[in-house]
Image (cartoon, rainbow, N blue to C red):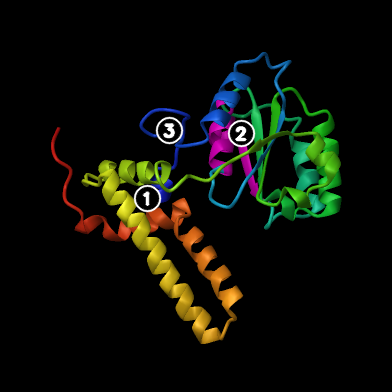
Amino acid sequence: MSLYNKYRPTTWEGTNGLIGNDKIKKQLDQLVKQSPLERPQVFLFTGPTGCGKTTIGRILASNLGCDIEYDLQEFVSADFRGIHTIRDIRRNMYLRPMGVGDNRVWILDECHNLTNDAQNALLKALEHPPSHVYFILCTDQPECLLAPLKGRCILYKVKPLNHTEELPLLLNRIARKEGKEFKKDDALQFIKDIKEEAEEEAKEIAERKGLKEKDTKAAISLARKQACHPRNAIQALAKVLPTLPDKKKE
């Protein structure tokens, strides 16, 4: 199992809690405490790739009383983008939960990939879902969703981890759980290094392709951002973990 999946947050707080997006965490925590009759059943999480939309959706599903093993259905809409997938959901959503939880949850990741027919079919499902059903939509391209579909959702704009406090904290947490010493200054230097390495690689590729200066700058900017995508940063950390000193006994 990759370190990214091994330490993927499963709660809002605690040693394996979600880092960042404190405002959204507070809002969702208060929402879950509402009466089921007053609680919204459709959520839309937007934000750039790697900011934690799906992770937040999974934590929310668990807090809504969904048995993650049996009653959480997660689809990547890039792979299941047609109307048949939505029709299957509409047929199955009336079934009662199979696990120990009270509710069923569908997460539709990259939902902007759904065809217009599929979005219209989903809209019908969202109009009057059974009381035990919740839908969580995630996308980095909300402008591709039909306006009536977005109108049925409670919108949350998820922010990526900042590189000065939140990403260093995440890397520090993982390193220490792996028994390694990795202070904030170490994490900040590590982030700087992976950005510079990504920039050099982007420059070399741009030079080989003969890109114009404007396109080269855009490629470098994208490479630096992608290097700090949590999944990529954690993969880079995994490569250097064996070289880090062991954590001091407390």
Find out whether residue 106 is within the magenta segment. Answer: no
In the image, 142 versus 189, the foreground residue is 189
Tell me which amino acid carries mark 2.
Asp
Please name the residue that numbered disc 2 is placed on. 71
Is the Cβ of the residue at disc 1 closer than 8 Å to that at disc 3? no
Earlier-in-chain disc, 3 versus 2:
3
Badge 3 crowding class, 10 Å Cα cut-off, few under 14, some 14 to 19, many 20 or more, is some
Count of numbered circles in the view: 3
Residue 173, x across and y down, in percent = 32, 41
Residue 114, x across and y down, in percent = 76, 53
Q: Which mark is residue 17?
A: 3
The magenta region covers 53-76
Q: Which mark is residue 3?
A: 1
In-image side of 159 versus 152 (left or right)? left
Write down the quadrant of residue 126 in the picture.
Answer: top right
* Above or below 202: residue 120: above
Q: Residue furthest front?
A: 213
Secondary structure at numbered mark 1: helix
Earlier-in-chain disc, 1 versus 2:
1
Badge 1 crowding class, 10 Å Cα cut-off, few under 14, some 14 to 19, many 20 or more, is some
Quadrant the C terminus occupies: top left
At 72% from the left and 28% from the top, the residue drawn is 41
Earlier-in-chain disc, 1 versus 3:
1
